[in-house]
Amino acid sequence: MIFLVGYTGSKESKAALALARDHAALFAAKVVVVVSSEGGPREKHGHIGKASEDLFFARNFLEEKGIDHDCHELVRGVSPGEDMVRYAEEKKIDQIFVGIEKKSRTQKIILGSNAQYIILKAPCPVVTVNR
């Protein structure tokens, strides 16, 4: 089995990573952690550094429990939600873990929702975590 975690460093994504790690230990699964950025001229240098830090944390977090894992930074010119769904399709992921943040309806309209996109379009089951 292969589990995919969309990771941003937020408390919600850390909870999703922790749950994926626990499930991976139970099912002898591999965990793939993805940090996704759209890239392009709007991408700030600070985002790139943060992505590296987030992946470093995720690697160490999974290694502590001896979980088989891969960590990737994706910059493919699409939203993080689209990126996760595409990656899951390409790599035949068995389950996706994603942290969700409560947003008002107005925030969803203005900011969109990567989690909602993943839940609706994913080719596999999606586990959402809100902490």
Image (cartoon, rainbow, N blue to C red):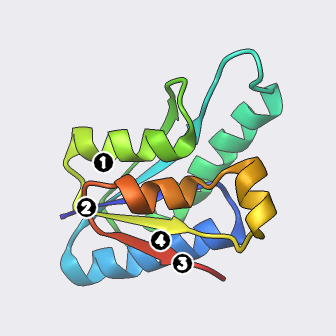
Circle 2 or circle 4, nearest the eye: 2
Q: Position of residue 16 (x, y in %)?
A: 52, 72
Measured in 3D between alpha carbons, the distance from the residue under mark 1 to the one under mark 4, in whole angstroms, is 25 Å
Amino acid type indicated by mark 2 = Cys
Q: Is residue 90 left or right of residue 79?
A: left
Confirm or deny contact between disc 1 and disc 2 (CB under 8 A): yes
Measured in 3D between alpha carbons, the distance from the residue under mark 3 to the one under mark 4, in whole angstroms, is 21 Å
- Quadrant where the N terminus is found in the figure: bottom left
Element at label 4: loop
Q: Position of residue 123 (x, y in %)?
A: 25, 54
- Name the one closer to the observer, 53 or 38: 38
Label 2, residues with CA under 10 Å away: few <14, some 14-19, many ≥20? some
Q: Which residue is mark 1?
A: 88
Circle 1 or circle 4, nearest the eye: 1
Amino acid type indicated by mark 3 = Val
Q: Upstream in the sequence, badge 2 or badge 3?
A: 2
Q: Which mark is residue 129?
A: 3
Label 3, residues with CA under 10 Å away: few <14, some 14-19, many ≥20? some
Measured in 3D between alpha carbons, the distance from the residue under mark 1 to the one under mark 3, in whole angstroms, is 18 Å
Q: Which mark is residue 124?
A: 2
Q: Which residue is mark 4?
A: 64
